Image: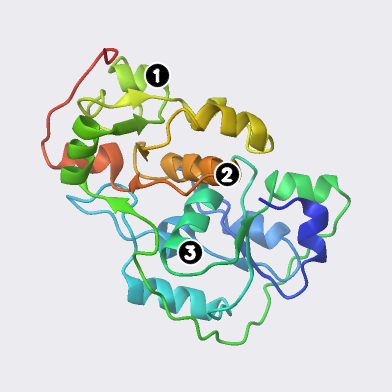
Amino acid sequence: MIDAAEAAAQAGAVRLDVRWTLGGPSREADYAAGHLPGAVRLDFDRDVCGPAGPVGGRHPLPEPEALQAVLRAAGIDDDSAVLVYDDGDYMAAARTWWTLRWAGLDDVRVLEGGLKAWTGAGLPLETQAPQRTEGTVTVRPGQLPVLDAEDAAAWAEERELVDVRAPARYRGETEPIDPVAGHVPGAVNLFLGEDDLADPQRLRERYEAHPDAAYYCGSGVGAARTALAVTTAGMTTPPLYIGSWSDWLSQGREVATGEER
């Protein structure tokens, strides 16, 4: 995480605007209306994630070649510093941060508070899209640990698999997005909405009780936000079941409901 003042002073960083609304329209118009100076617009669904299919979940990993083309077009090199921002809910920004680190980029920061924090600090926006020199980054996938459905099932039996969705979705009481409510058998629930990413000490107090946990959500976006929270707390970035609940259901796997005992 990096605050607005630090981000403004970070000369040379490639800025990525990934503002996104789940199930909503493209945010291209918001980008055109105003974005951080020099920021490149990435479409979260198209550029950061792979296309959804019958199996793999709603936000699968991108193909390395496709991601590499996107990052090079944004002007990113292997040693680039990258600043990612969204509206401040950290969903798209965290998943983008996680994806870039998975792809082998080391210096990736998330703007604390998002665009609102930038403008709240009196910092300027611009409306013109920048002209970027083609980058030379080489995507090296697999630099962060990823689980598939088989791994997730085993993790729930042998260690601790954590579902970070709202408790009602976990318990199977309601499901606003996917076709079936419930959770992976054996998973426990820690709601991501209780995290304040601006408070590393509180995050550490929460997550140090789960040193061997892997995380999932609906499609690997909220889980990436939790991975950012754990990393912000000074702990090792945890494994993610990136296909998450949408992938689990697509494979016709067992659904658990209620509270885990």
Amino acid type for the residue under numbered disc 1: Pro
As drawn, is 10 to the left or to the right of 223? right
Q: Amino acid at mark 2?
A: Tyr
Dot 3, how many residues are within 10 Å of its Cα: few (below 14), some (14-19), or many (20+)?
A: many
Nearest to N terminus: mark 2 or mark 1: 2
Residues under labels 2 and 3: Cα distance?
Answer: 15 Å
Q: Nearer the viewer, residue 49 or 229?
A: 229
The residue that disc 2 covers is 90
**Number of numbered discs visible in the structure rendering:** 3
Q: Quadrant of residue 53?
A: bottom left
How far across and down, in percent of the image, does residue 106 sit?
54, 67
Asked if one can make out residue 69 in the rendered structure from this viewpoint, the answer is yes
How far across and down, in percent of the image, does residue 42 sit? 53, 64
Q: Tell me if mark 1 has few (under 14), some (14-19) or many (20+) residues whose alpha carbon lies within 10 angstroms of its own.
A: some
The residue under the point 39% across, 64% down is 143
* The quarter of the displayed image where residue 163 is located: top left
Q: Is residue 177 visible?
A: no
> Residue tagged by mark 1?
167
In this view, the mark in front (2 or 3): 3
Q: Quadrant of the C terminus?
A: top left
Residue at image point 36% right, 27% down: 176
Sequence order check, earlier mark of 2 and 3:
2
> How many neighbours does mark 2 have within 10 angstroms: few (below 14), some (14-19), or many (20 or more)?
many
> What label does residue 100 carry, if any?
3
* Rendering coords of residue 225 (x, y %): 50, 42
For label 2, the SS is loop
Image position of 92 (left or right of 163)? right
Give the residue type at disc 3: Leu
Marks 2 and 1 sit apart, C-alpha to C-alpha, by 20 Å
Which residue is found at the position 86% from the left and 48% from the top? 121
- Secondary structure, mark 3, is helix
